Amino acid sequence: MSDLIKNALDSEYNNVGELMGIDDALMGEVSELMGRLNTTEKVRFMRKISTKPNNSRGSRAEFEKFFKEVPEAVKQSLIDGSLRLADFTVYSIKPVNSKTIKLFETQDDKEVGLRNISNAKLPKNFVFLVSGIYLLAGVSADANDKEKTKATDFKSVTAFPAIANAEFSLKANKKQIIPDGNIVRKFITDNNHLAPLGYFKLDNPRLIKDDELIEFTVELGTMVGLDANTVIYVGLDGTATTP
């Protein structure tokens, strides 16, 4: 049995046939191998690659549905085990200093407590499925001071009516994931004890690749009532590839 087939069977993707088509995953090697097996061996082999010890759950299960869209190099790394899947949140914090707040910008640098990606793009070979989004707001001791902003106590947008009544959108590579005009009130979960604070679960998760520009924008209708040191936190939550 080739190393590629063995890796596929031994990896966390023992359901690789379901995810991406057996021959697509193993570059035609399954068809060649099957032709050399007797009937009993074929049955054992098919049972092995189609058996899943545990069903995937949550955003990981959602990620598997998008496996065919994963770049080929990343796909093979997941199969051979050099990359795996992990829970992850891509986040950014920005001051509310105008009616248009762009949470990810090309001049941004990665900095603990402010954002965990640079240049509004994912790191190389990092593929991420957005399953849900967090949106919270707070008042920094000084929105122009990074250290003080990092210590902001973030709360529900209900405490910030101008933000709660604003609109938001999410794009990746200029393509809409969430169209313009969506109301920020979707993030109000204060009375929903089954959802985290400020969390909006996407009914239509989308995959973001490492070469795609991420754009999350909040458009305010007014800034009336907002403290001059108001800041916004956004967290794109889901499943990502990791070594």
Image (cartoon, rainbow, N blue to C red):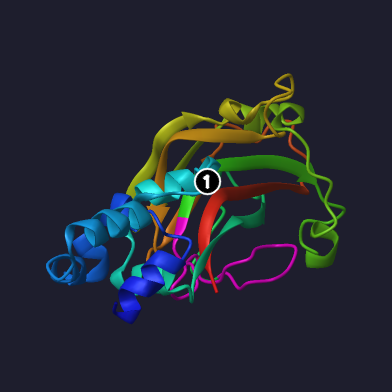
Residue 201 in picture, x, y percent from top left? 54, 34
Residue 152 in picture, x, y percent from top left: 83, 51
* Local crowd size for mark 1, using a 10 Å CA cut-off: few (<14), some (14–19), many (≥20): few
Q: Residue 175, percent across and down?
A: 31, 50
Q: State the image coordinates of residue 74 (x, y, percent, origin top left).
A: 38, 71
Q: Which residue is at a point 62% across and 31% down the rendered structure image? A: 187
The relative height of residue 188 versus residue 231 in the rendered view (above or below) is above
176 in the magenta segment: no
SS at mark 1?
loop
Tell whether 154 sits left or right of 47. right
Q: Is residue 14 above or below residue 98?
A: below
How many marks are shown on the rendered structure?
1
Q: Is residue 178 left or right of residue 157?
A: left
In the rendered structure, the answer to whether residue 206 lies left or right of residue 138 reads left
Q: Quadrant of the C terminus?
A: bottom right
- Judge by depth and name the residue closer to the eye, 121 or 210: 210
Residue 35 occupies which quadrant of the picture? bottom left
Query: Which span is picked out in magenta?
Result: 108-128
Residue 68 visible in the snapshot: no
Q: Nearer the viewer, residue 154 or 98?
A: 154
Q: Nearer the viewer, residue 170 or 45?
A: 45
Amino acid at pointer 1: Asn
Q: Is residue 203 visible in the rendered structure shown here?
A: yes
Q: Which residue is mark 1?
A: 54
The outermost residue toward the bottom is: 3
Q: Residue 108 is drawn in which quadrant?
A: bottom right
| Residue 114 part of the magenta segment | yes
Quadrant of image for the N terminus: bottom left
**Residue drawn at the location 53% of the way across and 54% of the way down:** 239
Residue at point 85%, 60% (across, down): 148
Main SS, magenta residues: loop
